[in-house]
Image (cartoon, rainbow, N blue to C red):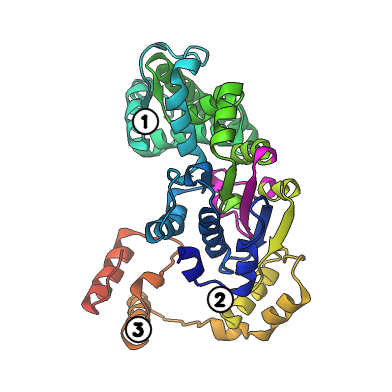
Amino acid sequence: MPEMRSLAVHSHQRMLIKRPIKSKLFLEGPAGTGKTTAAVGRLLHLLDSGVPAGSILVIVPQRTLATPYYDALRRSTVRAGGQVTISTVGGLAQRTVDLFWPLVAEDAGFGHPDDPPTFLTLETAQYYMARLVRPLLDQGYFETITIDRNRLYSQIIDNLNKAAVVGFPVTMIGQRLKAAWGGEQSQRRIYDEAQACATRFREYCLAHNLLDFSLQLEVFLKYLWTMPLCRNYLLETYPHLIVDNVEEDTPVAHDLLRDWLPHCRSALLICDREAGYRRFLGADPESALALRDLCDERVTFTESFVTSPDVRAFGYALARSLNRPIDTRSKPREDRRRAAGNARAALVYEYHRYYPEMLDWVTDEIARLVHDESVPPGEIVVLAPFLPDALRFSLTNRLEARDVPTR
């Protein structure tokens, strides 16, 4: 029996899974409504219907979000036809650059086009950045700011990555940073120095065939995706797309999908409402929602399988108190469910005069949930506006004494 038929799905999920193979669907809804479960079911349905595994590409914004798909494929009996490709846009870029390197190396400006490329990790990119920027620091660069050197190196790399995922040239990093600066004018030169470091790093990478994340993405989108041979290869290899958490992906990823979707035989794009938490990493929920217009059908899931009515009402009340816009696309039935819960029942407020008393209460509450109510420790999170070593040490010791594992 195919694995898809044993997947625990509800009627509305099953209706989406069983849509005609050639459908292009845009699925949206709040977190916890079973969208990824439906996408996994859709993937297994495609395989069960005879779609070759090697023709399916699953795109996620970060690797950890691919776990449900990997788990389902391990459990299922996949027909012959290769393997399903599960990747981020960055991973797809690296794989494509590696494959088509001889065709693009010279045009992209690499110093040794006949030699193979070296793909840098975050750690190795920071190593080379340190080698290049350290002499500039000794010359007086960034002397007016107090920041750990490793943090400074990673910040410059982050600027390069932001430029790549948003789609503007690395030569505009300093200009954009200065445009966003609202402090003293004398500090604007720091952004010129950041630009000089980013430019120095990029020139070094080009001269030595080194590709950090930003350069991999730029070479892929600027040179390879515009090359008919490469584009046709990808479009013909992967005519079936499943894209999860599209709201957490970047503008250049959405531009790529905008070009890809008209050529797909089938597609399923999944978007969380009121999400886009990775904005600080370049996520663009607005451009994600614009992809709806390229799909044949829009499907909305509204019923959460993980959120209690009280927590739902609390979230609704919290958004309203913060003057955050409430999703006006909600149906009256969903609005009634929001109102059905008791927001105050979802929140416990405790005041303690002394700091150790607060820590003891937190520890006791967690221990009660774990030992008395059998709540898995991995489902509990402690949030703090600031997490100094002293707080981490105090909480960890208290929880260890109560046999509660922490990380």
Give the residue type that dot 3 points to.
Ser
83 left or right, relative to 263: left
Tell me which numbered mark, 1 or 2, is placed earlier along the sequence: 1
**Image location (x, y in percent) of residue 254:** 63, 41
Residue at 60%, 58% in the rendered image: 275
Mark 2 crowd level (few <14, some 14–19, many ≥20, 10 Å Cα): few
Q: Nearer the viewer, residue 208 or 368?
A: 208
- Residue with the mark numbered 1: 120
Q: Quadrant of the N terminus?
A: bottom left
- Residue with the mark numbered 3: 374
Q: Residue furthest left?
A: 401
Give the residue type that dot 2 points to.
Thr
Residue at 63%, 48% in the rendered image: 266
CA separation, marks 1 and 2?
41 Å
Location of residue 222 by image quarter: top right
Tell me which numbered mark, 3 or 1, is placed earlier along the sequence: 1
Residue at 37%, 83% in the rendered image: 369
| Range drawn in magenta | 262-287
Q: Which mark is residue 307?
A: 2
Q: Quadrant of the C terminus?
A: bottom left
371 left or right, relative to 257: left
- Tell me if residue 213 can be seen: no
Q: Residue furthest bottom?
A: 372
Q: Nearer the viewer, residue 211 or 402?
A: 211
**Image location (x, y in percent) of residue 55:** 52, 42
Give the residue type that dot 1 points to.
Leu
Asked whether disc 3 touches disc 1, contact meaning CB atoms under 8 Å apart, the reply is no
